[in-house]
Image: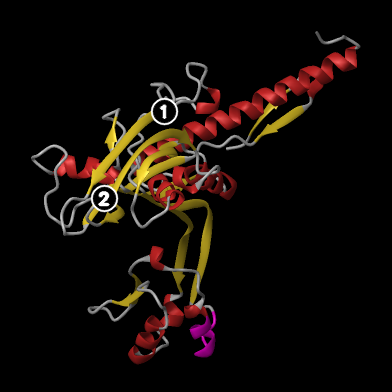
Amino acid sequence: MASEKMLGGGASRTSYQRFPKVRIREMKDDYLKFELRDTDVSIANALRRVMIAEVPTVAIDLVEIESNSSVLNDEFLAHRLGLIPLTSDDAMTMRFSRDCDACDGDGQCEFCSVEFFLSVRCDSDQTMDVTSADLQSTNPRVCPVDVAIASAMSADPGGYESPEQKGILIVKLRRGQELRLRAIARKGIGKDHAKWSPAATVTFMYEPQIHINEELMETLTLEEKRSWVESSPTKVFGIDPNTQQVVVIDSEAYTYDDEVLKKSEAMGKPGLVEIYAKEDSFIFTIESTGAIKASQMLINAIDVLKQKLDAVRLQDEASDMNELTSHLGIQSI
């Protein structure tokens, strides 16, 4: 809510500070649906963009291949390794390799990197699948996401419950072929490369508000009501079997396609329904790659957004101080 503060000389300055509210609707490890209220679209979109591009995770960034006799070349393998999602619960506390003063970038640093090793050879006539499960990490808290999930679900740590859960396929080997490599995983953000993005998808929509004109709706026959309800491509409206009234079943299923409005006009009944978007209420849907939980992605995004806003505020304060010293003719030191 806006408030006014009195300044020197009787002048007033309006504050547009608002207090957004979040209400969780559904939460799983890799899925989150929540409401964001009492804010505007700029904040909602900033939160969405930060979740996609600026929440840090860990991903393989450097691959040193010692031996590769597979059908895939070194660059192809390095690219596939980089896209394997890694558990990144500690990413927020890790250092970016470019900012780390504890190492020389060789990958053997507990603060900014994690080493992985892979060494496999096919000695049978059956084709061997090399998967993410074959990657050996030097840090048990950073491993391929599918391996972590399988370890949690299986009674055998590091094992898989069924043959279908063999991990993410990297390459296939035939008899006599081998692959030996060392990989270094580093902290990064999706803005630098998509492999660091923790989000599979992040969307939001305005919360729709739907008002049915009951008096005008009563002028329609039951068949016309059914035709009107069926004109919506999604299951937004329905007919109450007891009262034969048109009711809203799921307002959030409305996709702002205007089909029911066009149908109303075609039937000669404009104003049959009014639909508008609440400009300060948004419904978010988040799906995670598994690198971090969807709920943690939201918390980390809020932290990153707060850091960016703090940086802007400090910059503004420094700019105001420079203007004041300049106006007073004081040399800044």
In the rendered image, which quarter contains the N terminus?
Answer: top right
Q: Residue 130 carries which label?
A: 2
Q: Is residue 95 above or below residue 218?
A: above
Horizontal side of residue 225 vs 279, given as left or right? left
Q: Mark 1 points at which residue?
A: 113
Question: Does the stretch in magenta take in 212?
Answer: no
What x and y, as percent, mark residue 291?
A: 35, 41
194 and 276: which is toward the camera: 194
SS at mark 1 in the image: strand
Q: Which residue lies furthest to the front in this view?
A: 176
SS at mark 2 in the image: strand
Q: Which residue is drawn at 19% across and 53% down?
A: 165
How far apart in space, not on screen, are marks 2 and 1 (Cα)?
A: 23 Å
Ranked by sequence position, the earlier of labels 2 and 1 is 1
Q: Label 1: few (<14), some or many (≥20) within 10 Å?
A: many
What x and y, as percent, mark residue 318?
A: 73, 20
Q: Residue 29 carries which label?
A: none
- The answer to whether residue 284 of the structure is visible from this angle is no
Question: Type of residue at label 2?
Answer: Val
Q: Is residue 217 above or below residue 12?
A: below
Question: Does the stretch in magenta take in 267?
Answer: yes
Q: Which of marks 2 and 1 is in front?
A: 2
**Quadrant housing residue 317:** top right
124 and 57: which is toward the camera: 124
Question: Type of residue at label 1?
Answer: Ser
The magenta stretch is 262-270
Q: Residue at x 47, y 43 (%)?
A: 51
